[in-house]
Image (cartoon, rainbow, N blue to C red):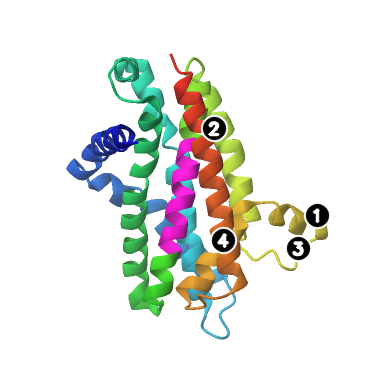
Amino acid sequence: MTTLITDTRTVFSRELRPTLRDPFTIIFSMVQPLVFLALFTPLLPDDDGTALQWFVPGIIVMSCLFASSMTGSNLLFEIQTGSHERMLVTPLRRPALLIGRALKEIVPMFAQAALIVTVCLPFGFRFNLMGALLGLIILAAFCIGLGALSYTLALASKNQEWLFWTVQQTLIFPLLLLAGVLLPIDNGPGWLRALAKANPLSYVVDAERALFNGDIWSSATLGGLLAAAVVAALGLGVGVRAMRRSD
């Protein structure tokens, strides 16, 4: 266990170093969420002045979803350049190669959330600090699981790069829309609400909205926590198994 933790820390540091050396990549990745904020917020009903309170937590989840789902592309690049092959023949434990990469996704997620909140504060957005911190912990677990699934997809499509992007783009937008990030789906048809209930991202989004607004002990918080834990366990379980079989 000690060796696995040490190896995981080594991989985590290796993966995080390029981001710390070039933090502009985090800022550049904020363009899309900020565009959504600028274009969608004016379309939301704001009779009681809570449009930002509803929309901003969803945008934070959306930025996490986009970033984490694309992390497998970095592994694809390493496979193509032979860097991943060299990592496989090192003494590092194979589960650490995936766990360390997945844990790295937490740092950009925290940075992106802080930037989004900072940008929205002058426009009237307010948040509960304790709830926001708990929300980020839930989102971190979700990031780890989704990042691990993205790496698993990269391993499965290492000889067919188009497959990674096809699956990623096919799944990302249905997950986003069914989670009610951009528009509420409470008044949608029954089949749409049923699909939303089967989407784990829906529970994470509801939890983030409740927590950022200070409703810490709501049922939405528990639902988001369970959904994030399931995604993290599933992602790491499938990912570690795929990494052990990697060649």
Provide the residue designation for mark 1.
Answer: 191
Q: CA distance from mark 2 to mark 1?
A: 29 Å
Provide the residue span drawn in magenta. 135-148
Residue occupying image coordinates x 39% and y 37%: 99
Residue at the (52%, 35%) spot, across then down:
237
Question: Which of the two discs, 2 and 3, labels the residue nearer the N terminus?
Answer: 3
Where is residue 247 shown, x and y percent of the image? 43, 13
Q: Are marks 3 and 1 in contact (CB under 8 Å)?
A: no
Q: Which tag, 4 or 1, sits closer to the chain's start? A: 1
Q: Nearer the viewer, mark 3 or mark 1?
A: 1
Instruction: Pick whichever of labels 2 and 1 is earlier in the sequence.
Output: 1
Residue at 73% x, 52% y: name it.
195
Q: Is residue 141 magenta?
A: yes
Numbered disc 4: secondary structure: helix
Give amino acid for label 4. Gly
Expressed as whole percent of the image width and height from the top left, the position of residue 65 reads 49, 48
Q: Amino acid at mark 2?
A: Val
Which residue carries the number 2 mark? Answer: 238
CA gap, disc 4 and disc 3: 21 Å
Q: Residue at x 54, y 76 (%)?
A: 217
Residue receiving disc 4: 224
Q: Earlier in the sequence, mark 4 or mark 3?
A: 3
Tell me the number on the disc at residue 188: 3
Q: Are marks 4 and 3 in contact (CB under 8 Å)?
A: no
* 65 over 223 or under it: above or below: above
Q: Secondary structure at mark 2?
A: helix
The amino acid marked with disc number 1 is: Trp
Which residue type does callout 3 highlight? Gly
Where, quadrant-wise, is the N terminus in this rendering?
top left
In the image, is residue 25 above or below residue 116?
A: above
